[in-house]
Amino acid sequence: MGTVREMLVELTGTPEFAEGVEDNTDLSASGIDSGDLVRLVLLIEQRTGVEVTAEDMEGLITLADYERFVAERTGAAQPGGA
């Protein structure tokens, strides 16, 4: 399970929901409201140290987008890159 998917489980408290969301599903269309997306971004920032700007959020639509974003940002922050 990916990092962001694990955060989605924590956020919703429903593993079945998070596991049922396909990687390329628009999170807004999956039943996640804007408040939940903001809470997801806050969890991402707290847990990974990755800053997510409002501009970044405009391009983050699917679970795969979030996972890729976090992977790229945390990989770039680690010595030696990823």
Image (cartoon, rainbow, N blue to C red):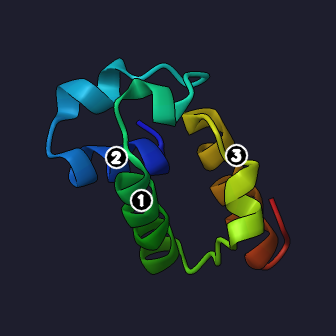
Residue that carries the numbered disc 3 in the rendered image: 68
- Residue at 37% x, 58% y is 35
Q: Is residue 36 above or below residue 24?
A: below
Q: For the N terminus, which image quadrant?
A: top left
Labels 2 and 1 touching (C-beta < 8 A): yes
Amino acid, disc 3? Arg
Instruction: Identify which residue, 37 or 75, lies in the foreground.
Output: 37
Q: Position of residue 60 (x, y in %)?
A: 67, 47
Q: Residue furthest left?
A: 13
Residue that carries the numbered disc 1 in the rendered image: 40
Amino acid, disc 1? Leu
Residue that carries the numbered disc 2 in the rendered image: 8
Badge 3: residue crowd in 10 Å (few <14, some 14–19, many ≥20): some
- Residue at 32% x, 25% y is 19
Badge 2: residue crowd in 10 Å (few <14, some 14–19, many ≥20): many
Q: Position of residue 13 (x, y in %)?
A: 14, 46
